[in-house]
Amino acid sequence: MGIVQGSGQAPTLYIVMASDLKPLSEINILFKYADDTTLLVPENTDIDISVEFQHFRCWAEDNHMIINLVKTNEIVFADHLLAHPYHHV
């Protein structure tokens, strides 16, 4: 929280600080690089993305970090044929 974003120390300090941040589910995958974190939640998971995100919010609060909700996005990837099973090509 006290490190200037873009400074040379920020990525290393974030990696150290976030070393204990892990997803609740072993199926969900967490990628951490520099000061960015990406969570992959497959369609068939035992822990919903909203539960995982709440877990991350609690982690951030406990570690005196702020999640920038303006830069936080959810992207859903779907096969258009699976999304519309009655569509014939």
Image (cartoon, rainbow, N blue to C red):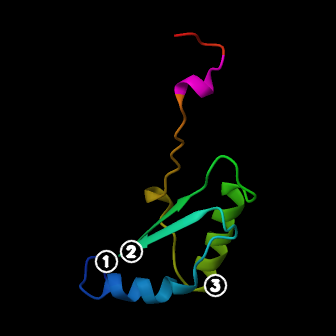
- Find residue 5 and name its label: 1
Q: Secondary structure at mark 1?
A: loop
Residue 13 visible, this orientation = yes
Percent of width and height locating residue 67: 51, 69
N-term mark: 3 or 1: 1
The answer to whether residue 1 of the structure is visible from this angle is: no
Q: Nearer the viewer, mark 2 or mark 3?
A: 2
Res 78 → quadrant = top right
Residue at left 51%, top 10%?
A: 89
Residue 60 x/y as whole percent: 58, 78
Which mark is drawn over residue 81? none
Instruction: Tell which of 44 and 68 is nearer to you.
Output: 44
Q: Position of residue 33 (x, y in %)?
A: 38, 73
On screen, residue 31 above or below 75: below
In the picture, residue 87 is in which quadrant?
Answer: top right
| Mark 3: secondary structure | helix
Of badges 2 and 1, nearer the viewer stands 2
